[in-house]
Amino acid sequence: MQAKVSGSIHLLCSCKEYWSVVIPPTQHLALVKDIGFTGVFRLIFKPLVDEFPCFGAICYSLREKKKMDFTLKVIGGEITSIPGLSNAIEGTIRDAIEDSITWPVRKIVPILPGDYSDLELKPVGVLEVKLVQAKELTNKDFIGKSDPFAVLYIRPLRDRMKTSKTINNQLNPVWNEHFEFIVEDASTQNLVVKVYDDEGLQTEELIGCAQIRLNDLEPGKIKDVWLKLVKDLEVQRDNKNRGQVHLELLYYPFGMKNGFTNPFASNFSMTSLEKVLKSGVDGKEASENGIDVKHKRREVIVRGVLSITVISAEDLPPADLMGKADPYVVLTMKKTETKKKTWVVNENLNPVWNQTFDFVVEDGLHDMLILEVWDHDTFGKDYMGRCVLTLTRVILEGEFKDSFQVEEAKSGKLNLCLKWSPQPIYRDS
């Protein structure tokens, strides 16, 4: 029988070992000693055995750091006197120490002789993330608007953090970017998203951050979420509106056998995105260090025809002095920038169009549809708002009808019907 006993214990730890770090390009040697910190630790006693002390090993991991101190000595010159360099070196060392013992990394102390390799950190699955967009971001610039970009991670290791492109002068950015993360413990880990304002040569400024627990995701099923941005993930007393970020998430564990089948067979009904992801992943393909996971997967290029019926709009905001508007809708496929538009309905805040448009889509999983509502004027046009839609839902369901709030407008929604006719192409990768 095996069992896990875990708990939070406040400990004061110290380390008398010496760490050495070579700092290029000057080849200075930094010695780190007398490491001491306080924090909340997680202890796991496993496996349980019949002989005293009734468990074979102890696993310990830092759950939450309170304070850390260490002595840093640089051999080869006083480079720490250079402004900013000392802080950079200390920050790098702090990150290295924390990353080496912070959950889900765990240190194993054998108590009884035996093989405890099964207790070591191992990847258990992959998280697919589509960073769709953000809206109503706080403006951090005095002139113009913020230039937002996002940083996403499960573990805050530099080589495992993902950064989106920067969208200049925009408080409602559309990214439509896809990222992939290795998961080591789906029951305790979170996906963190931080949105920053790019300040060029200056340090970027945090707009807001959000997180979602991986155990809130059903394996093999798409989750579409809007996350509210806050100032601090630890202190939940932030009532200021900093905006929201839109994500599509799919978590699939290694060895998942029933979720990845051909969605285009004639007798198969699509219910989730894993059915368009052809995967041959299993846990045995993890590398020795337990971090880099190579998996064979056939990349699916989902090509097809998207049919959109723009049925009507409701409760649009007035756009002229008479309290009316002359609305029409411009439909754009983001990747190809193919555009189509409805006719103009004069003097109506609840227009009815019932117009259908067809788009040939070459890569449905990575494209999106943008619908912009405009007010027609004799001397031009006025922007009223927009709806941004990924194609994930229509690919999975085949056809649906729904209402969508018009973003960047005080009121209004669009009533749409979408239909997908797939023509898949498989490409080995």
Image (tube, rainbow, N blue to C red):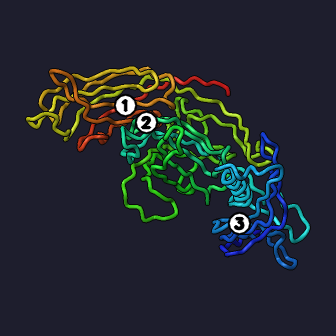
Indicate which disc, 1 or 2, sits on the residue closer to the N terminus. 2
- Horizontally, is 75 left or right of 103 in the view? right
- For image coordinates 58% across by 39% down, the residue present is 179
Residue type, numbered disc 3? Asp
Give the SS element for disc 3: strand
Q: Position of residue 253 (x, y in %)?
A: 65, 48
Name the quarter where the N terminus is drawn.
Answer: bottom right
Cα separation, mark 1 vs mark 2, equals 10 Å
Name the quarter where the C terminus is drawn.
Answer: top right
Q: Please say if 289 is above or below 147.
A: below
- For image coordinates 69% across by 53% down, the residue present is 86
Indicate which disc, 3 or 2, sits on the residue closer to the N terminus. 3
Q: Are marks 1 and 2 in contact (CB under 8 Å)?
A: yes
- For image coordinates 19% across by 31% down, the residue present is 352
Cα separation, mark 3 vs mark 2, equals 42 Å
- Horizontally, is 428 left or right of 360 in the view? right
Q: Which residue is mark 2?
A: 174
Residue type, numbered disc 2? Val
